[in-house]
Amino acid sequence: MTARDEILNGLAEAVVEGDASKCVELANKALENNVDAYDAVINGCAHGMSIVSDKYEKREMFVPEILLAARAMQGAVDVLKPYIKADEIKESGRVAIGVVLGDIHDIGKNLVKLLLETAGLTVFDLGKDVLPEDFQDKIKEEHVDLVALSALMTTSMMEMKEDVKLFKEEFPAVKIMVGGAPVSQEFCDSIGADGYADNASEAIRVAQKLLSE
Ligand code: HCB
């Protein structure tokens, strides 16, 4: 096993264990060993978080452990973030991101935000459980080019549908990207959103494509 694999596996494991100090230690070790910071976030931290999601689904992990895992992951992300190289993205753009009304799941949204920022985009984070009018105000005030919506529940997917309808009516030129575990390309097409991303790195590619159209 290479040093990279060892560190990344260790990071994923530390996220699953919710071991915040181990996460920080391994994030620093990744940097010392010239492991690419982006690689460490995606294939270490985010990989660990997807193991946590699976374990939750199988009832092998419970809410308090999930929250510890998320906090531990954030510790590593904070160490790695300044070292993620800005992508050579040609089309810079202004993005408003948020989790739709009624939904407080923001772990995935935070990862997408981080990567969009490192891709050179200007990101306005509205947080979670966001009112449609807060998105609308931000789009107007900040001349936003792209809205990235996140939803993790079947109930909030309906809110996402309403948001897309509303924003498309009021701001036809503004692109809308959607994502979150239950969201799919099919759902994206059915609600008239412009793009769907399955994960944070894919979100960069989709944002880049939408902004260049
Ligand atoms: Co929560 N929860 N939860 N939860 N939760 C889910 C989402 C369920 C699927 C679990 C289940 O029952 N099987 C379920 C929803 C069921 C459904 O709707 N069909 C559920 C439920 C029901 C609830 C509560 C209602 C539970 C309760 O109180 N009875 C409650 C929600 C309250 C509310 O929102 N109003 C609740 C609470 C919680 C917490 C607080 C314990 C915690 C959230 C902590 C936080 O986010 N700060 C939590 C968590 C962690 C989960 C699971 C286990 C993991 C979600 C997660 O963070 N995944 C989740 C189970 C699951 O999804 N398998 C469970 C990891 C991230 C990295 O993945 O998919 O979010 P992601 O993001 C990806 C990807 O989708 C994409 O990029 C990200 C990075 O690669 N992406 C985008 C995301 N957003 C994007 C936006 C874009 O524009 C583009 C790409």
Image: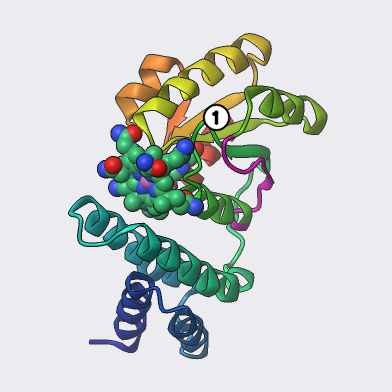
Depth check: 9 or 87 in front?
A: 9
Q: Which residue is mark 1?
A: 101
Q: How many marks?
A: 1
Q: Is residue 107 above or below residue 152?
A: below
Most distant residue in the left direction: 58
Depth check: 42 or 127 in front?
A: 127
Asked if residue 142 lies left or right of residue 32, the reply is: right
Percent of width and height locating residue 94: 70, 39
Please give the range of residues in magenta: 118-129
Quadrant in which ligand 1 is drawn: top left
Asked if the magenta segment contains residue 126, the reply would be: yes
Q: Is residue 184 above or below residue 12?
A: above
**At 24% across and 55% down in the image, what residue appears?**
54
Q: Amino acid at mark 1?
A: Leu
**At 67% across and 30% down in the image, what residue appears?**
145
Most distant residue in the right direction: 141
